[in-house]
Image (cartoon, rainbow, N blue to C red):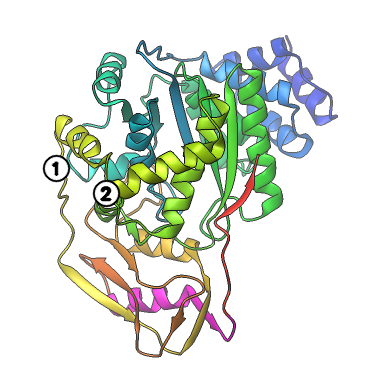
């Protein structure tokens, strides 16, 4: 098969066959074609797009370039995936809640890159083991009803190689390429049902509803074509989720949340995602599932399960947070009308709590607290947040925090659940 003919076909907006897509992935992964030819194909896909079937073939080709994980356990195996956002600690809370609801939740997580956090980094702040073998995932899932572990290098190696080229050629934003990248890893586990939390807003990669909707539809449609039950929620990320952003500090917030002390926005996202899984697995209605999840969280039923899981894998439920603190006080009075999550995410990177590039070491002990959210009224001089830091110019940090907040004269109401797919 002549590779340049595949490029030409997609350049002209034609649909690629399963064989053509599989050969393209195989040849590139094996080093049989140069970067510039795969870059040309990626750019053609960026401009011409792919059908759901094409995306399915690309997903499967990347998935089968590596190992898969077949978990054997009693119960329905489910998964939840988030597209990432500031303060997104949903995985830490929903996994033990789903276990308490009778599911087996097996989640593969990633590390932070760019302005959004990574679940693996948050868990690593406790000192626990986050990279598990198939046998360890199976054992932990059977014992606790859930597992959250880091994606290994043996899962979808083709995706890693293609993603690096996408990053270098500015084709990361292509919806079909995003869908196939996510699913080539999520479908590596024999999950029966997946719920997707697609974030939209300033603190997310998807800035508009149009793109968030396209991504959610792509993830759900391709998952269904692969034989999985799937659903998605588009959730607001125009401000940080919950009360904190960082690594260790988000673990502490998650422990508090599972004891019943949880912010309203975080509760709504976790329970709604649980409700979707409850419905798509035909366990019961969305409303019933959402209600069960809320009762579990507010009663603290899943707290011991989560704490014992951390300790079983060698972690502590009291991760260290820096003792250096600085309050951020409002410079004017009014209603908060905007909180730029992306700016706050980059602030955490400046403080050492995030990565500019893969492989960088991060400081788990730093982060941000949020005392006020969009719609709250604030008086001049009133604290709106707190900076937890170890190094750097704290006055500059406070200025960056305040630059992310805008005030106005009218109260704005935020609907955290934007749409259900």
Q: Residues within 10 Å of mark 1 (few under 14, many from 20)?
A: some
Q: Can residue 162 be seen in this view?
A: no
Residue 184 relative to residue 324: left or right: right
First in sequence, mark 2 or 1: give its number. Answer: 2
Magenta-highlighted residues: 394-410
- Residue 140: % across, % down: 25, 22
> Is label 2 in contact with label 1 (beta carbons under 8 Å)?
no
Q: Is 402 in the magenta?
A: yes
Q: Which type of secondary structure does the marked residue at label 2 adopt?
A: helix
The quadrant of the picture occupied by the C terminus is top right
**Residue 78 versus residue 418 in the image, above or below:** above
| Quadrant position of residue 133 | top left
What residue did someone put label 2 on?
Answer: 251
Please check the rendered image and state whether residue 408 is part of the magenta-colored stretch, yes or no: yes
Which residue is painted at 44% across and 45% down in the image?
270
Q: Mark 1 points at which residue?
A: 316
Q: Please report the residue visible at 37 percent of the width from the left and 26 percent of the height from the top.
A: 102
In the picture, residue 296 is in which quadrant? top left
152 horizontally vs 62: left or right: left
Left or right: residue 8 versus residue 255 is right
Residue at (27%, 40%) from the top-left corner? Answer: 301
Which residue is painted at 51% across and 81% down in the image? 335
Instruction: Check residue 207 in the rendering and tell me which mark sits there, or answer none.
Output: none
At mark 1, the secondary structure is loop
Q: Where is residue 277 in the image (x, y as percent from the top left)?
A: 51, 32
């Amino acid at each position: 098969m002549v590779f340049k003919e595949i490029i030409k076909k997609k350049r002209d907006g034609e649909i690629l066959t399963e064989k053509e897509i599989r050969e393209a992935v195989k040849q590139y992964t094996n080093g049989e074609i140069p970067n510039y030819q795969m870059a040309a194909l990626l750019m053609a896909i960026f401009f011409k797009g792919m059908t759901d079937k094409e995306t399915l073939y690309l997903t499967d080709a990347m998935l089968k370039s590596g190992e898969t994980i077949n978990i054997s356990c009693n119960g329905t195996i489910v998964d939840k995936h988030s597209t990432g956002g500031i303060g997104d600690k949903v995985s830490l809370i929903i996994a033990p809640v789903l276990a308490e609801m009778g599911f087996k939740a097996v989640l593969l997580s990633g590390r932070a890159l760019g302005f959004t956090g990574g679940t693996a980094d948050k868990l690593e702040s406790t000192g626990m083991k986050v990279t598990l073998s198939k046998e360890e995932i199976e054992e932990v899932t059977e014992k606790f009803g859930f597992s959250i572990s880091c994606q290994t290098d043996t899962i979808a190696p083709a995706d890693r190689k293609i993603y690096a080229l996408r990053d270098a050629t500015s084709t990361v934003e292509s919806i079909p390429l995003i869908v196939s990248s996510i699913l080539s890893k999520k479908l590596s586990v024999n999950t029966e049902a997946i719920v997707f939390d697609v974030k939209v807003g300033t603190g997310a990669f998807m800035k508009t509803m149009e793109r968030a909707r396209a991504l959610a539809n792509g993830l759900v449609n391709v998952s269904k074509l692969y034989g999985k039950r799937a659903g998605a929620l588009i959730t607001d990320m125009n401000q940080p989720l919950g009360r904190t952003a960082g690594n260790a500090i988000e673990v502490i917030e998650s422990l508090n949340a599972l004891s019943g002390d949880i912010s309203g926005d975080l509760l709504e996202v976790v329970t709604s995602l649980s409700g979707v899984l409850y419905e798509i697995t035909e366990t019961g209605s969305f409303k019933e599932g959402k209600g069960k999840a809320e009762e579990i969280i507010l009663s603290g039923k899943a707290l011991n399960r989560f704490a014992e899981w951390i300790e079983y894998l060698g972690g502590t439920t009291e991760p260290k947070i820096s003792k250096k603190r600085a309050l951020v006080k409002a410079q004017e009075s009014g209603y908060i009308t905007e909180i730029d999550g992306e700016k706050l995410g980059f602030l955490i990177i400046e403080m050492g709590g995030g990565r500019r590039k893969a492989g960088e070491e991060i400081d788990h002990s730093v982060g941000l607290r949020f005392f006020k959210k969009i719609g709250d009224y604030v008086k001049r001089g009133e604290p709106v947040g707190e900076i937890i830091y170890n190094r750097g110019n704290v006055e500059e940090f406070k200025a960056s925090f305040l630059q992310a907040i805008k005030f106005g004269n009218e109260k704005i109401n935020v609907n955290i659940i934007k749409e259900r797919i």
